[in-house]
Amino acid sequence: MITFWIFLIFAIIGGGVLFGRIRSSILQQKMLDIAARQEKHAPKAAEVPTHFTSAGSKIQEHKVTQQEIQVEQNQSATLNDHEESSILESPSRQVDDLTIQERENYDARDQARDEHIIALRLLVEDLFEESGGTSSEITTDTKSEQSSIELRNTWIQQYEVPLNEHAAFIEQEEIGSGIRMMETAEMENDDILYRLEREGGKSGEVQISLAWDDFNDLDLHLFCPSGERIYFNNKKSACGGELDVDMNVRPTSEKAVENIVWPENAPLGKYKVGVHFYKHHLKDDTTTVCKFRARILTHGKVRDYTGSITHGQAMQMVTSFTLNR
């Protein structure tokens, strides 16, 4: 009987010890599971690939936490939203903005450009037979118009190399030739939109238009961010720009307009606007000094300028602007 009770006591004690060990094991496993879950959901360091310099030395790595990545992404998103919502237009300086010394340097460059165009024999002689007409728009004879275009194309082919050389010389200039921005009141009676509609000119996210009020032949040249130049002998550029209106090869209108446009996807970068007084038509008291207006439209924002150019001058760098996103 005593033996039975002793056995029972040891059994109870042994069961208690065994139960304690099992319970301890279960608690330990639970703790491990909790720790594992915490580790699984805790922020982890981002893996950064190993980079080397050109000399082969390893660049010091920095492991960024998930929190740091999120902060950076938020800042980047904010910056991108700001940048995408703003397109900067930075017009070039004009001669009137220069100091005395800067103006002297500009005048020297301008004289060099005038001498350059003469040296290359690019001043157009009287290629076309002038005819009389009224001071209003006149009807153009199709055969005469075609003959004039053929004459100009022949001249272009003969002088294409020096023309491009002169354009490259002009493109180096960073200062506008002295145009000024027009006041809103001055634009109240301006008919540049009517002229563009009359000639079927397109509109777009970037558009440069030139208008003048006599029978002379001015030509619009645009130096693109891609390095191309859009003008009468290269009306469509690989970067999407197009000269879609080119007037007064013959003296057809005293309300002339020319137009270069990107309907969409205008490239970012620097644009330079040039104007050349190609031909002085001896018609209806036209003079050798021609006033013009230039309109620059960038993503709905319009700026209007006015200036003048003299026949015999080199191509003038009117202004430049830069599109940044």
Image (cartoon, rainbow, N blue to C red):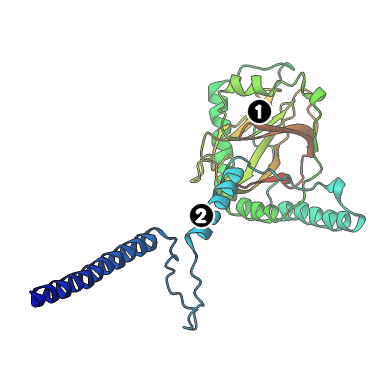
C-alpha separation, residue under disc 2 versus residue under disc 1: 53 Å
Q: Which residue is found at the position 53% from the left and 29% from the top?
A: 146
Of residue 274 and residue 117, the one placed in the foreground of this image is: 274
Crowding at mark 1 (Cα within 10 Å: few <14, some 14-19, many 20+): many
Of the numbered discs in the image, which one, if any, rests on residue 257? 1
Examine the rendering and report whether any part of residue 227 can be seen: no
Which quadrant, please, contains the N terminus? bottom left
Residue 154 location (% of width, % of height): 55, 42
Mark sitting earlier along the chain (2/1): 2
Residue drawn 57% across the image and 37% down it: 151
In-image side of 41 versus 195 (left or right):
left
Which residue in the structure is indicated by mark 2? Answer: 70
Foreground pick, 150 / 25:
25
Residue 44's tag is none
> For the residue labelled by badge 2, is the local secondary structure a helix, a strand or a loop?
helix
Q: Is residue 54 visible?
A: yes
Decide which of 199, 114 is in the foreground and name it.
199
Q: Amino acid at mark 1?
A: Val
Mark whose residue sits in front, 2 or 1: 2
- In the image, what residue type sits under mark 2? Gln
Q: Can you give x and y, in whole percent of width and height, for residue 196 in the image? A: 62, 24
Question: Where does the image place residue 31, in percent across and percent down from the top left?
Answer: 34, 64
Look at 74% across and 17% down and name the residue there: 135
- The answer to whether the residues at label 2 and label 1 have Cβ atoms under 8 Å apart is no
